[in-house]
Image (tube, helix red, strand yellow):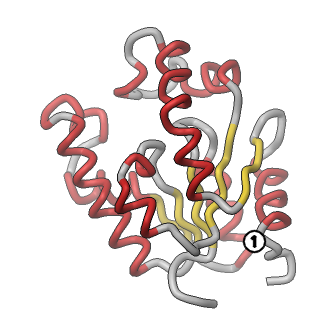
């Protein structure tokens, strides 16, 4: 294996990056890392609390650092937070890496992210806000990804299988 993670998953909040990433890591016999988990560990508080206490710009700086460190150190499967691709430096870091954009439609997103967890960017009018975020981020996800895989009406195992197929890692 080359430098950097064997698979990097990007996509919106609630799409299943962590769940699919854990399945992929198991299938590939490697480890899983989530940049959001790294941020929580470093900050000592939940992401929603970072947004409230220090604001989004501070969170984005923590995110930049966490992604940079993870890309440099981690050789397994890496999941990035939904907004990580907003940073130009992060997008540059992902060039040449096996990045897959996990995608889903707005109805599925609302079902998955609606009321189950604190999502600081979806507190007011989640459906409209999600659409706005996706309009802003979809081109960035597409820019960094080698391929896109839909998670709609698929189990995490099915999505992991599709990721392995699209990256030609079946016999890895």
Residue named by callout 1? 27
Residue 61 position in % (x across, y down)? 22, 52
Q: Give residue 93's position: percent from left, percent from top.
A: 43, 69
Quarter of the image with the C terminus in it: bottom right
Between residues 121 and 95, which one lies in front from this camera angle?
A: 95
Q: Quadrant of residue 68?
A: bottom left
Image height check: is 99 above or below 136? below
Q: Quadrant of the N terminus?
A: bottom right
Q: Is residue 71 above or below residue 136?
A: below
The residue sitting at the bottom extreme is 1
Picture residue at 83% right of the left edge, 57% below the top: 162
Left or right position of 130 against 60: right
Position of residue 16 in the picture relative to residue 122 (left or right): right
Q: Residue 54, how many percent across, how many down?
A: 13, 37
Query: Residue 106: x and y, percent?
Result: 65, 22
Please tell me how many numbered marks the rendered image carries.
Answer: 1
Which residue is at 24% across, 45% downward?
A: 59
At 62% across and 26% down in the image, what residue appears?
Answer: 109
| Secondary structure found at label 1 | helix
Q: Is residue 156 left or right of residue 38?
A: right
Q: Residues within 10 Å of mark 1 (few under 14, many from 20)?
A: some
Residue 18 visible somewhere in the drawing: no
Residue at x 13%, y 33% (from the top left corner):
53
């Amino acid at each position: 294996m080359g430098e950097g993670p064997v698979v990097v998953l990007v996509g919106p909040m609630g799409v299943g990056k962590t769940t699919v990433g854990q399945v992929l890591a198991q299938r590939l016999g490697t480890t899983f890392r989530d940049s959001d988990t790294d941020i929580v560990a470093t900050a000592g508080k939940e992401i929603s609390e970072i947004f409230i206490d220090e604001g989004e710009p501070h969170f984005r700086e923590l995110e930049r650092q966490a992604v940079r460190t993870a890309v440099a150190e981690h050789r397994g499967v890496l999941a990035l937070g939904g907004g990580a691709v907003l940073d130009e430096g992060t997008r540059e870091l992902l060039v040449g890496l096996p990045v897959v954009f996990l995608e889903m439609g707005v109805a599925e997103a609302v079902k998955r992210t609606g009321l189950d967890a604190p999502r600081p960017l979806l507190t007011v009018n989640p459906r409209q806000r999600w659409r706005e975020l996706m309009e802003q981020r979809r081109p960035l996800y597409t820019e960094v990804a080698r391929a896109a895989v839909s998670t709609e009406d698929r189990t995490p195992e099915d999505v992991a299988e599709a990721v392995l197929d699209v990256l030609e890692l079946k016999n890895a």
